[in-house]
Image: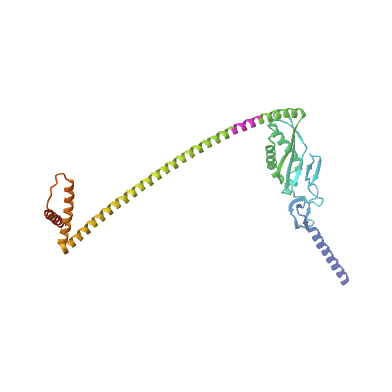
């Protein structure tokens, strides 16, 4: 009995070890970078495994590997490429969808060939797998419908210049619908817009005429601009000349003004100096006269007879000169003349003292 129990215990341990190893190998999921895996539990969508190490419950959870139905179209719709691997890894990288070239009708019933390409990426694998049966086919149909509506509003002349607006309108419509599919539309480009040979010929001729017309318009515009620039240059030159003449006149007037001011200042200084010189000369004369009177007064106070004699001699000399010049002169004795001179000198000295 003990041998049997030991064998049963060993079997149990081996079974538990096998289950543990199975849990490790089946429960640990390593998702590559740039990919995701969808986990179903009991046949229902459960979660998304992102890049790195993830844990699932074996036998209850399983990786969805079938019926993913995620693909895109390349080379004008001739090549189909899956966006998942056989291990169930769903690509999260940016993808390119290049549908077939479309033949559409414009507003003027012209046949227009449009070749578009869309760039997208899967952002929610659960929606991309479960919310739409085949997002690539649905996206293709939506591109066709949207381009048919957009091109139908344009004629063959305007559709050529509407490439950017076509691409933007298409991207906006696709993004609005792709949100429910777990898809993000990154950008949409219109690679080519073409026409049937007859329309292309007509458009080529019309384009040639348009180019000729634009060339003439450009030439006329350039000539008009040249005339305007020339007129503006002449106007500026005349303005500069007038401003130069004005500045020269102002400078000349300022020079004359300064010259007159300097002349007036010079005359004023000259008159001032002359007046000061006259005043100084008169002052010196008065000062000399005062000193002469002072000296005379001093002389009289010390030797009055000498002064009287001197003045008498001067008076005699003056009288002699007067008599020599007069035709009716009388001869007077020298003594009498001396008396007259002495008397005149005395009278003059007395007047000088009175004036002091």
The reply to whether residue 355 is visible in this rendering is no
* Residue 124 in sight here: yes
- On the image, the x and y values in percent for residue 227 come to 58, 32
- The quadrant of the image that shows the N terminus is bottom right
- Is 243 situated above or below 220? below
The percent position of residue 261, horizontal first and vertical second, equals: 38, 46
Residue 139 x %, y %: 74, 41
Of 62 and 158, nearer the camera is 158
* Left or right of 126 on screen, residue 276: left
Report how many numbered discs are placed on residues in the image: 0
Indicate how the structure is coloured in the image: rainbow
Whether 305 is among the magenta residues is no
Residue 20 quadrant: bottom right
Front residue of 162/177: it is 162
**Residue depicted at x 16% and y 53%:** 316
Between 26 and 314, the residue placed more toward the observer is 314
* Residue pictured at 77% horizontal, 50% vertical: 90
Highlighted magenta segment, given as a residue range: 216-226
Q: Position of residue 61 (x, y in %)?
A: 77, 55
Position of the C terminus, as image quadrant, is bottom left
- The reply to whether the magenta stretch includes residue 217 is yes
Is the magenta region chiefly helix, strand or loop? helix
Of 99 and 332, nearer the camera is: 332
Relative to 9, residue 120 above or below: above
């Amino acid at each position: 009995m003990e041998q049997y129990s030991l064998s049963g215990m060993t079997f149990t341990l081996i079974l538990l070890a096998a289950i543990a190893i199975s849990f490790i190998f089946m429960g640990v999921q390593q998702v590559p970078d740039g990919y995701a895996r969808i986990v179903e539990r009991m046949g229902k969508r459960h979660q998304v495994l992102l890049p790195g190490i993830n844990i699932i419950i074996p036998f209850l959870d399983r990786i969805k590997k079938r019926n993913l139905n995620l693909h895109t179209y390349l080379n004008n719709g001739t090549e189909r490429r899956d966006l998942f691997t056989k291990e169930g890894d769903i690509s999260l990288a940016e993808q390119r969808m290049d549908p077939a070239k479309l033949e559409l009708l414009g507003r003027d019933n012209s046949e227009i060939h449009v070749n578009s390409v869309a760039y997208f990426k899967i952002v929610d694998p659960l929606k991309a797998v479960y919310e739409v049966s085949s997002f690539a086919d649905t996206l293709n149909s939506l591109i066709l419908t949207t381009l048919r509506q957009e091109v139908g509003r344009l004629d063959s002349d305007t559709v050529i210049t509407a490439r950017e607006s076509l691409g933007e309108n298409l991207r906006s419509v696709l993004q609005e619908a792709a949100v429910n599919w777990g898809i993000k539309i990154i950008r949409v480009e219109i690679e080519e817009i073409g026409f049937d040979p007859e329309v292309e010929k007509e458009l080529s001729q019309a384009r040639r005429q348009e180019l000729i017309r634009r060339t003439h318009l450009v030439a006329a515009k350039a000539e008009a601009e040249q005339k305007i620039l020339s007129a503006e240059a002449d106007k500026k030159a005349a303005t500069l000349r007038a401003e130069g003449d004005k500045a020269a006149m102002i400078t000349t007037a300022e020079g004359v003004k300064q010259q007159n001011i300097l002349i007036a200042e010079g005359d004023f200084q000259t008159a001032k100096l002359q007046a000061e010189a006259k005043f100084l000369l008169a002052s010196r004369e008065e000062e000399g006269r005062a000193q002469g009177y002072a000296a005379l007064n001093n002389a009289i106070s010390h030797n009055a007879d000498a002064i009287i004699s001197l003045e008498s001699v001067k008076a005699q000399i003056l009288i002699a000169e007067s008599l020599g010049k007069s035709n009716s002169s009388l001869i007077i004795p020298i003594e009498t003349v001396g008396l007259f001179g002495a008397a005149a000198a005395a009278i003059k000295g007395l007047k000088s003292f009175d004036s002091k």
